[in-house]
Image: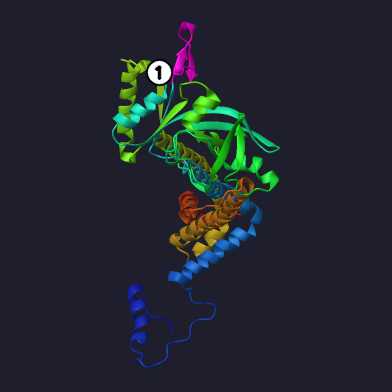
Amino acid sequence: MNMPNMPKSKALTNAAAPRELRPSGSASPARRPGKSRRPRRLRGLSGLYQNCVSALQSVLANKTRSLLTALGIIIGVGAVIAIVSISEASTASINNRLATLNPTEIIIRPGSANARGGIRQGAGTVQTLTQADADAIAAQVPHVAQVSPVVTENGQVVFENQNWSTSIQGVYPDYQQIDSWTMQYGSFFSSEQGSYAVIGQTVLTNLFTPVGIVDPVGQQIRVGGVPFTVVGVLNAKGSSGLGNADDVVYVPFLTAQQQLIGHTYVNSIDVTADNTGDVSTVQTAVQQLLEQRHGITNSANDDFTIQNQSAILQTVEGTRQTLTVLLAGVASISLIVGGIGIMNIMLVSVTERTREIGIRMAIGARPRDVLTQFLIEALMLSLLGGLVGIVLGIGGGVAYAVLTQTAFALSPVAVLLAFGFAAIVGVVFGFYPARRAAGLDPIVALRTE
């Protein structure tokens, strides 16, 4: 039956009228064959999970390319962690050695002699310090805890049929506290004169260990042909850039000066302040006193030098921190280079998968879904590279500790920072390719072969 001529809008209205008159309880009409329900988009955590699975499948589909893409991240994270681990292990080792230095100690050494033409010959080439200078510092400078002049001579030490060449130093009894020595056996001598000797671990090892003597206290040795009785053995300090601190024999100052060395000047004067806050004050007062005693009116002409142990500690720590920051900065550049590599590969991936992107959009994927998927792929490359880098970095730190025989040290904060930075690099450098993929026209993308 033909429908009479009427406007199209009225025809649509009349066609819809019977549907409105259906009872509410009646069943809805069956869907036409060939028409399927539009797929529902995954939302929330399930959608994120599906994107992660899809991204992982894409990464694993090209294992070699994914590995090469993440190589910059792997090297960067591994380098940062290895550098921090090595730095912390080195710091612990240096601190153990510097712990033997007294932060309140001030060392005064002779100055430099001037040759013809104004050529300075170096510290210690002119002998201007005396025992009287040391005693004046102890008596006249406030906030001084201990003072000891030091005379030094290299000589041969003999015990029975064993002998050893070592450093022989004449000091005051206070030198034990000044140089932070602790005793393994016996005690330090308590007089400035007498035939007593205190030996270091290296001397003990080379003189007494070969003959089976563990505790040599009470044994007699000959130092430069002069007999001395061993009254103490020092605990080990170890060697450092300044030499082997354990290769030494200490004897009373006046005995060394009169019987072993034979001159009246001293090689150095060691002073300690009563606390670290007074070190600078004591140093200034010592300088003024010695200038007065030596008749010096211009400090530029001082015939002595003053070394502050606290300043040495600060310099070493500052140098270590600077090197750590420098090396970590260099390693961070590798992370940025790795991020650029990820961006390039993701752009290639967008080009290769243009048709796939078009199909996804055609069946209901929104630009936001495409953006999320490609961002997750870039993030996954960075995180996988970061995990491999963490393993390699820890391995490098362990290898350094084994080779140098130091304790392995690594801060968990450094690992988290390196891993987090790798993730940020992946997101930042993956955003542009992801944005480009999300901005594709589905129709144009479907036409791409």
Magenta stretch? 111-128
- Locate residue 154, reporting x and y percent: 58, 28
Most extreme residue toward the top is 117
Relative to 73, 29 lies left or right? left
- Locate residue 336, reporting x and y percent: 50, 44
Residue 42 visible in the picture: no
Q: Is residue 23 magenta?
A: no
Q: Residue at x 57, y 32 (%)?
A: 167
Q: Quadrant of the N terminus?
A: bottom left
Q: Is residue 130 depicted above or below 165 in this figure? A: above
Q: Is residue 123 magenta?
A: yes
Q: Quadrant of residue 271?
A: top left
- Locate residue 42, reporting x and y percent: 46, 71
Q: Amino acid at mark 1?
A: Asp
- Depth check: give the residue in front, 289 or 350: 289
Colour mapping = rainbow
Q: Is residue 98 depicted above or below 299 in this figure? A: below
Q: Residue at x 44, y 19 (%)?
A: 111
Q: Residue at x 51, y 45 (%)?
A: 87
- Disc 1, SS: loop
Residue hosting label 1: 303
